[in-house]
């Protein structure tokens, strides 16, 4: 039994971790913390859990580090690294769901996150927890950086193309669309029902932090090939009037002549043994992965325009956050990767 | 292992049965049938199941009755009783999710359903599968009539009051609201997105078939008490712009003097040992039971108006259909009642 | 040309007043005020107005009272009466959209609003601006109290019954459902998209302030008849996952024997000459009045239960707020009542 | 007074034409036709119009061609050209809202629409009714081809770039998102609420008919410049869970060095005198144009990627269909272009 602490109970990431872990056969939630709601029950904050998880929230300061084997940090970036700094030498493992350890260096981090990194020396030691691409780095990891939601969807969409060096690395455009839970549990003008319902818009144009995470993830893939050249992507996120779900539509120009069939075959082959990636023969739909750790991918070649189009769909709170964190836990603790993650899409 | 056939794969009830049973530790889906899609895979009709359930759909005519222990009829009323008629002497059990065996007699059925009943003699032998009220009738049942969605929500909301004879049985008003999946998978003007989105309306005023099902269910409860008088309810269903979920708001006038606390205590006590009923201290919300077999109930007394208000919320496709059917299966086969039904609400 | 000031630009009531008045042939918006956004343009706060209304927001303190003929107070209750107190002797008329002058006395106000009234002496002089019921009181009014959204829908639904004394005044139950704009423009947990979307719930049970407004409005109607007895209603509001729209479903027990036809005829007759009330032959739908000052009403008698059911639908921001305020303006300034209010429902 | 016939009352285009024309000061709807609902009132089919437009629907065969000055064809493609063929020599003008006369030749039409054109000789005589680009062609037109919804949004987004020859005409990618009304009033699996709500997906990949309409429209713009080369676009439509609204996100590579400011200035300048195009300084939102004939445009240059991003938002039923048709009518009959079209966005 893996004894678990979830640090940060208030947000959607925290509640999704509980939703998933509560039925995980090898996990035991020992502690859930919240600094603002210490002393209340978890189900007071998330009433859907009444009778299911009524644990009393504690302060992270009271964590008994001998009592847990794994800590999930479900915290905002910046806050997260404070805990990593404090707990890095503890015997428990850490899976950090924030953006603090996803990038390649403190410099890059500081450029995109506009804040100083507290543990620059640690960055290189923390593997990027996208199992489909870096499974073996995670097996013995002490700390894992759980990927962002858009980067997960995008990297899984483009990995087969980039890893095989078959597209122009400057041609990639990612038109991404996410549900509102991506903006968090906080009540803001952005999350006000009347600004979202019946609406649709782009945001964070040219400046979203996931841009660099995508570029670094794809660039590293390519480096395993011969011709290295940094991947520069156009990344445009949009806000969908739905709770959950990300769909990314990616465009890239092939380096050499290909066919629709060869592209589809490449994807079938690349993901053949992946339990969470479903290669589809038609465009994916976000509702077909809702509530699950699945990533649905579809790739096609448009002969008329000489362009490859790839789409992928994930649930941003599951494969894009809490589900992938549990997948990483499974790997880090030597469990079957799908343990506790075989949810079925809630459709309708 | 209970060997199962699901008759009728096309509708939401069919797909929900699969969603639930696929992870049920003691159930094995042997056959899924569809007369219109025979030969296709289940995931062709419900693409969210790709890689999860790709069974080939067969014809119900080809059912090998030695190979199954239980048949779920996920069919429209009228069609359902044809199969019951045909299969009533087979050795497998039958759980019928249609309205064909829910009422007290063929006469009542024919009055409300405007069609002749094919097996009038069977009606009295088929118990009404609302476990919280009739658990012991179900243990050895050969055929079970699975309750309607509105009647489930309403009976659970009102049972404590009616069973204790504490409200005027002519005073009950049920203002009910359901998501669109209650109208089925068929594409009609009623289910067209642009007629539902941003909209809200009542329908089937004064004539909905669930009215009589509610009245009979509540009347029977009362009959177990001393003072018998048929319950006549005002039942008004409305269509919500959501997929899933029923919320009923019920009003009734007490027979004797009561208090808010005594009402709440009565509910706490009535449902103390029920695993799927959560008595809440605040009004229930449909999203807090989404995807689960839970029924959230809240009761209060308004001193100013001398009226009791009770609300309950269920997921119409789960506790209102497929989940309750599996709960009935668990009982009929001697399993723990919650087996395979411990889903956690999908919120957000 | 009526020269107009709108006090309070930030909320939905303010922006709806602008939406309506900008095309009103006899109105001229002189000033729009906001204390928090003074100096910004109106379209900065409400970007849909870019190029349509780019007026600069001023402070209410700077109002040139010689320059305006009418002031709309689009403010929260409590704040509103401060302005009424200050401006009551000015030569301009005032239409107050808050709840501050809707009730019958300062005592009643203080009981339900839990705050002291600043101008108790004024309350009796301010007519209640529901034109269909009190048109002649409004013609020469200096100050008008614009009704609440729920009371408007409910009073129009029940007026024919109560005014003709044909229902038991203790039997009335109002099950009301409103879109989220009723909760205002403020970002709160209640208005967060993920708490509203796919959800439905009751709120403010037994305690909503509109209860007393409904009771007083209906009681006054009845007093014009012989048998006086205060109307006590059960009022239960619910939150719909839509932006705009209120639907109320009302239940009442008739005093004498009636028929479905006689009820429908009574409504046809009562509202025959009303330009904004449409008596329907089927249940109303909120989308069929969206964006308009219309109120759709449907009444029916259920012989089986001996109960009358009445439903009405309005757009809470128009007939329930800004539209009705303009209707009141038209009356108070001697214009045709429909001037500038002939919007057509936006469906789909 | 322009005497008008609307041919085809059932669809959304028909009902939007009525919504707009009913308040048009210079238009008089003489006849609305429907072959399937002949004899019923318009408000029977579209109940939101009760008391607003209760005209009796007639058959198009009974059209008195002396009684009308203008006929709007609100019909499916293929059906539309039958009426054009039949009525081409009548004295009334025709505005065709279908796709039948939008393309450059019968050959192109037949390739993309997979059907033979009935009046190939007419195609060249019918101007393309996008006023912002071809205003002068429309002044004396007898027949006008009203543009498609996606092509309207896209052409307005890209016209400044293409007309000034400043982008690589092979680099253009259009990632488009539309509300469900674009799929029409018909009840299909695509428009079923439960397939749309909480969902998002691409459709008609690589094959949507609007692709060629966009390419021809943009190519013609460029031909007015020196360097002619056909524009080939990547066009990917997606289905949004909203009723109305299109947002297109376009990407293009500049031919020469430019700046963010120069791009924005180009747009400001290009659309300076256009009453319906609003050049915004932030990304447009579909709700900010809802119910109106406005097109909101935003353009920016991303130095990091050397790419121009342009977004535009329209209401697909107004600027994308009925509103633009009325704008064309205004031009063809010498009226001020904005007559009857000054709706204000319905937000919230």
Image (spheres, coloured by chain):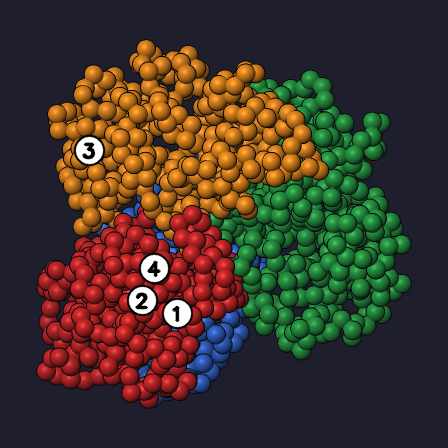
Chain colours: A green, B blue, C red, D orange
Mark identifier at residue C29? 4
- Same chain assignment for discs 3 and 1: no
- Chain holding disc 3: D
Q: Is residue D198 visible?
A: no
Q: Give the label, 4 or 2, closer to the camera.
A: 2
Kindly identify which residue carries mark 1. Answer: C63
Q: Are marks 2 and 1 in contact (CB under 8 Å)?
A: yes
Q: Is residue A213 above or below residue C257?
A: above
Nearest-to-viewer mark from 1 and 4: 1
Number of the label disc, if any, that sits on residue D2: 3
Pointer 1 or 4: first along the chain: 4
Q: Chain for mark 4? A: C
Report the front residue among D343 and D237. Answer: D343
CB contact under 8 Å: marks 4 and 2 = no
Q: Looking at the image, is mark 4 or mark 3 nearer the viewer? A: 4
Q: Position of residue B32 (x, y in %)?
A: 50, 41
Report crowding for label 4: few under 14, some 14 to 19, many 20 or more residues within 10 A (C-alpha): many
- For residue C278, which quarter of the picture? bottom left
Residue B170 at x, y = what percent?
25, 74
Question: Subunit of mark 1?
Answer: C
Gap between marks 2 and 3, in whole Å?
39 Å
| Secondary structure beneath label 4 | strand
Q: Position of residue A166 (x, y in %)?
A: 73, 25
In the structure shown, which secondary structural element does the residue marked by tag 1 occupy? loop
Q: Position of residue B57 (x, y in %)?
A: 50, 36
């Amino acid at each position: 039994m893996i004894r678990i602490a979830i640090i940060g109970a208030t947000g959607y990431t925290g509640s999704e971790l509980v939703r998933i872990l509560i039925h995980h056969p090898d996990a035991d939630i020992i502690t859930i913390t919240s600094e603002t709601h210490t002393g209340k029950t978890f189900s007071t904050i998330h009433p859907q859990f009444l009778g299911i998880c009524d644990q009393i929230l504690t302060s992270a300061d009271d964590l008994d580090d001998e009592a847990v084997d794994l800590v999930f940090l479900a915290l905002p970036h910046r806050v997260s690294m404070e805990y990593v700094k404090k707990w890095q030498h503890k015997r428990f493992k850490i899976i950090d769901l924030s953006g603090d350890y996803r990038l390649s260096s403190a410099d890059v981090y500081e450029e995109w996150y506009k804040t100083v990194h507290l543990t620059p020396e640690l960055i290189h030691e923390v593997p990027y927890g996208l199992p489909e691409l870096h499974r073996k780095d995670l097996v013995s990891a002490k700390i894992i950086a759980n990927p962002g939601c858009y980067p997960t969807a995008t990297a899984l969409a483009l990995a087969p193309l980039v890893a095989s060096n078959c597209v122009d690395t400057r041609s990639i455009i990612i038109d991404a669309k996410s549900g509102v839970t991506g903006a968090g549990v906080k009540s803001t003008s952005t999350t006000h029902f009347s600004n979202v319902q019946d609406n649709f818009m782009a945001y964070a144009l040219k400046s979203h932090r996931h841009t660099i995470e995508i570029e670094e993830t794809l660039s590293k893939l390519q480096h395993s090939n011969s011709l290295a050249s940094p991947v520069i992507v156009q990344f445009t996120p949009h806000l969908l009037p739905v709770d959950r779900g990300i769909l990314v539509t990616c465009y890239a120009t092939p380096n050499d002549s290909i066919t629709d069939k060869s592209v589809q075959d490449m994807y079938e082959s690349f993901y053949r043994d992946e339990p969470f990636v479903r290669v589809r023969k038609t465009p994916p739909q976000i509702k077909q992965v809702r509530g699950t750790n699945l990533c649905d991918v579809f790739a096609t070649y448009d002969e008329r325009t000489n362009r490859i189009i790839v789409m992928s769909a994930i649930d941003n709170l599951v494969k894009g956050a809490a589900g992938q964190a549990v997948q990483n836990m499974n790997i880090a603790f030597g469990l079957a990767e799908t343990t506790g993650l075989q949810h079925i899409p809630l459709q309708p």
